Image (tube, grey):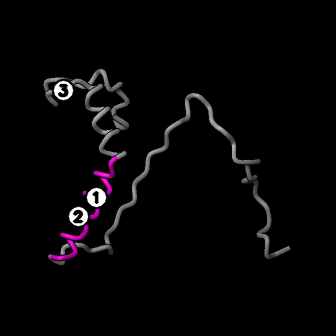
Amino acid sequence: MLRTGIPWQQLPTSAFGVSGSTCWRRLARWQEQGVWQRLHEVLLAELRAVGALDLAYAVVDASHLRALKGGTTSGRARSIAAGPAANTI
Protein backbone atom coordinates (compact mmCIF):
# COMPACT_ATOMS: atom_id res chain seq x y z
CA MET A 1 0.00 0.00 0.00
CA LEU A 2 2.78 2.40 0.89
CA ARG A 3 4.62 1.67 -2.31
CA THR A 4 1.69 2.06 -4.71
CA GLY A 5 -0.30 4.66 -2.81
CA ILE A 6 -3.66 3.13 -3.71
CA PRO A 7 -6.49 3.03 -1.17
CA TRP A 8 -7.18 -0.30 0.52
CA GLN A 9 -10.58 -0.40 -1.20
CA GLN A 10 -8.83 -0.57 -4.58
CA LEU A 11 -6.93 -3.77 -3.82
CA PRO A 12 -8.01 -6.37 -6.35
CA THR A 13 -10.29 -8.82 -4.51
CA SER A 14 -9.35 -11.54 -7.00
CA ALA A 15 -5.70 -11.37 -5.92
CA PHE A 16 -6.40 -11.85 -2.19
CA GLY A 17 -9.82 -13.47 -2.05
CA VAL A 18 -11.12 -10.76 0.29
CA SER A 19 -11.83 -7.05 0.04
CA GLY A 20 -9.24 -4.38 0.73
CA SER A 21 -11.12 -3.38 3.88
CA THR A 22 -10.88 -6.95 5.18
CA CYS A 23 -7.14 -7.01 4.38
CA TRP A 24 -6.68 -3.77 6.33
CA ARG A 25 -8.66 -5.06 9.35
CA ARG A 26 -6.68 -8.30 9.43
CA LEU A 27 -3.37 -6.51 9.11
CA ALA A 28 -4.31 -4.14 11.96
CA ARG A 29 -5.48 -7.04 14.16
CA TRP A 30 -2.30 -9.05 13.51
CA GLN A 31 -0.21 -6.00 14.38
CA GLU A 32 -2.14 -5.48 17.64
CA GLN A 33 -1.78 -9.16 18.55
CA GLY A 34 1.98 -9.11 17.95
CA VAL A 35 1.88 -11.59 15.06
CA TRP A 36 4.45 -9.70 12.98
CA GLN A 37 6.85 -9.29 15.92
CA ARG A 38 6.66 -13.00 16.77
CA LEU A 39 7.07 -13.97 13.12
CA HIS A 40 10.16 -11.78 12.87
CA GLU A 41 11.65 -13.28 16.05
CA VAL A 42 11.01 -16.87 14.90
CA LEU A 43 12.50 -16.18 11.49
CA LEU A 44 15.65 -14.66 12.99
CA ALA A 45 16.00 -17.56 15.47
CA GLU A 46 15.70 -20.13 12.68
CA LEU A 47 18.23 -18.31 10.50
CA ARG A 48 20.66 -18.12 13.45
CA ALA A 49 20.17 -21.83 14.19
CA VAL A 50 21.28 -22.87 10.70
CA GLY A 51 24.05 -20.25 10.48
CA ALA A 52 22.28 -18.33 7.73
CA LEU A 53 22.10 -14.97 9.47
CA ASP A 54 24.93 -12.68 8.40
CA LEU A 55 24.47 -9.21 9.86
CA ALA A 56 27.49 -7.94 7.91
CA TYR A 57 25.01 -7.32 5.11
CA ALA A 58 22.04 -5.78 6.91
CA VAL A 59 19.54 -3.35 5.40
CA VAL A 60 17.44 -0.90 7.37
CA ASP A 61 14.33 0.42 5.70
CA ALA A 62 11.76 2.97 6.79
CA SER A 63 8.78 4.83 5.48
CA HIS A 64 7.83 8.42 6.12
CA LEU A 65 4.17 9.33 6.07
CA ARG A 66 2.66 12.77 6.40
CA ALA A 67 0.22 13.30 9.26
CA LEU A 68 -2.75 14.44 7.18
CA LYS A 69 -4.72 15.64 10.19
CA GLY A 70 -1.78 17.42 11.71
CA GLY A 71 -0.29 16.38 14.97
CA THR A 72 1.23 17.67 18.11
CA THR A 73 4.58 19.35 17.95
CA SER A 74 7.11 18.21 20.50
CA GLY A 75 8.85 21.55 20.68
CA ARG A 76 10.69 24.16 18.69
CA ALA A 77 12.39 22.84 15.55
CA ARG A 78 16.16 22.85 15.70
CA SER A 79 18.03 24.99 13.23
CA ILE A 80 19.92 23.25 10.44
CA ALA A 81 21.75 26.41 9.41
CA ALA A 82 25.48 26.17 8.87
CA GLY A 83 27.61 27.23 11.79
CA PRO A 84 30.67 26.23 13.80
CA ALA A 85 30.59 22.98 15.71
CA ALA A 86 29.66 23.34 19.38
CA ASN A 87 33.11 22.30 20.60
CA THR A 88 35.00 24.85 18.46
CA ILE A 89 33.56 28.02 20.00
* 72 horizontally vs 58: left or right: right
Q: x%, y% of residue 47?
A: 20, 70
Question: How far is mark 3 from mark 1, CA to CA?
Answer: 24 Å
Q: Tell me the kind of residue under disc 1.
A: Arg
Residue at point 72%, 53% (across, down): 80
Q: Please tell me how crowded label 3 is: few (under 14), some (14-19), or many (20+) other residues with Cα within 10 Å.
A: few
Magenta span contains residue 12: no
Q: x%, y% of residue 37?
A: 32, 56
Q: Are marks 1 and 2 in contact (CB under 8 Å)?
A: yes
Q: Are marks 3 and 2 in contact (CB under 8 Å)?
A: no
* 75 horizontally vs 43: left or right: right
The kind of secondary structure the magenta stretch mainly shows is helix
Q: Tell me the kind of residue under disc 2.
A: Val
| Numbered mark located on residue 2 in the image | none
* 22 horizontally vs 86: left or right: left
Q: Tell me the kind of residue under disc 3.
A: Val
Q: x%, y% of residue 74?
A: 69, 47
Residue at point 33%, 34% (across, down): 1
Q: Nearer the viewer, residue 70 or 38?
A: 38
Question: How far is mark 3 from mark 2, CA to CA?
Answer: 27 Å
| Numbered mark located on residue 42 in the image | 2
Q: Nearer the viewer, residue 51 or 85?
A: 51
Q: Please tell me how crowded label 1 is: few (under 14), some (14-19), or many (20+) other residues with Cα within 10 Å.
A: few
Quadrant housing the C terminus: bottom right
Residue 35, placed above or below residue 53 = above
Q: x%, y% of residue 81?
A: 76, 54
| Numbered mark located on residue 18 in the image | 3
Q: Nearer the viewer, residue 66 or 36?
A: 36
* Residue placed under numbered mark 1 in the picture: 38
Instruction: Report the magenta residues as a range.
Output: 33-49
SS of the residue under disc 1: helix
Q: Please tell me how crowded label 2 is: few (under 14), some (14-19), or many (20+) other residues with Cα within 10 Å.
A: few
